[in-house]
Amino acid sequence: MWIARILCLFPFVVYAWSFAIVTPLRLGLLRGKTERQCRLLPLFALTPIGPFCPFRSEAADELDAPVEELTVEGPQFATAFSRIKLDLDLGNTPDKDQVLEAADKLKRSVAKWEATTNTMRNSCDFQIREFAKLAEAHIAKYGESIDNVVAGLKWQADCLRAMANQDAPPPPPPGLDLGKMLAAAQNQGSSPPSMVGLSAAERITATPFSGDEPAFESPTVKEEFESLCQDHNNLIQLGAQYGKFDPVGKLYFLDEIEKIEERWDIFFARFSLMKAINPKYVRQCNEFLKSMKMDEKDYRKLLKQCHDLLRQEADREGNTIGGNGLPPDSSTKS
């Protein structure tokens, strides 16, 4: 039956909630922490970079509410689709009202998801744009685009409504490769992570440092840590104006972000050599990345691709460059 084949696509397209928007935004933490508070935060990655950054811009905070809604709705759709598919596999006719309800809810959620995506793409804030490009890079890894995922979700809602009304299924939207998506959905080794898998993943509650490690007895280490936290937070807040920078200013900002990443690498490497990083924290980070079918190396590669996309975007912005595009006091300590 045609609808059964379409339902097979659900594990592929619904993952848009999984990593593309929900996961990056929910990993952020409160901004403006002191050195002591920052030390005790769960930093959500082996180093606090990209969406695992512990410092949040105001724009990122404002997206918490719509993202939380999508977080709740994703697993609900997985359950509803599984129930419908099970009925079909058993030769039963799914309840019409339940199918129509699932179609309507899916369509409404897709509209919210699309609005959130557009907000991210058009945001002036660097952290939000970074999330958007990270989603773009992650989806591209599976040969898809955000626009195709949105189109696929809308089409599935229309297919459900057609099934409930015993109508012929609508044709797939232009650009949606049905054969490729079916193959990907049936090949778990190459398909994206599922929302169910991400929901079951253990939350990262451990901290990288307890604050009682011998290294923190050194005033130099304390000063370095406090400086790194402050510089990183300042850069995130400066990034609120990223969209107003000219291309040179945006490239300069990306250079500063990568310098901060290098400083975190050095700081964490020192503690790793001393075996002073909390083993539970490391295990939880690895388990969380595993739920996204990634390891630390994969994640760093993805973040590099994300920043490359931002650099390419800046390069395309204009052939005429005037000024440096930066506020007067835009430097951070290196």
Image (cartoon, rainbow, N blue to C red):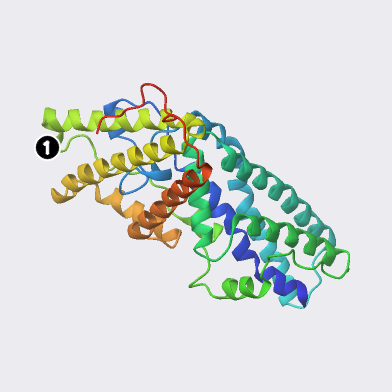
| 163 horizontally vs 128: left or right | right
Residue 327: image location, x then y, percent: 42, 24
What kind of element bears circle 1? helix
| Side (left or right) of 78 relative to 108 | left
- Between 206 and 323, the one lying in front of the other is 323
The local crowd at label 1, few if under 14, some if 14 to 19, many if 20 or more residues have their Cα within 10 Å, is few
Residue 245 spot, x, y in % from top left: 47, 32
Q: How many marks?
A: 1
Toward which corner of the image does residue 147 lie, by quadrant? bottom right
Q: Name the residue located 66 percent from the left edge and 56 percent from the top edge.
A: 77
Residue 12 shows in the view: yes
Q: Residue at x 77, y 56 (%)?
A: 103
Relative image position of residue 81 (x, y in whole percent): 69, 63
User: Above or below — where is 165 with respect to 245?
Assistant: below
Q: In what quadrant of the picture does the N terminus appear?
A: bottom right
- For disc 1, the marked residue is 214
Tell me the quadrant of the picture where the C terminus can be found. top left
Going 86% across and 70% down the picture, which residue do you hit? 168
In the depicted view, which residue is nearer to us: 266 or 3?
266
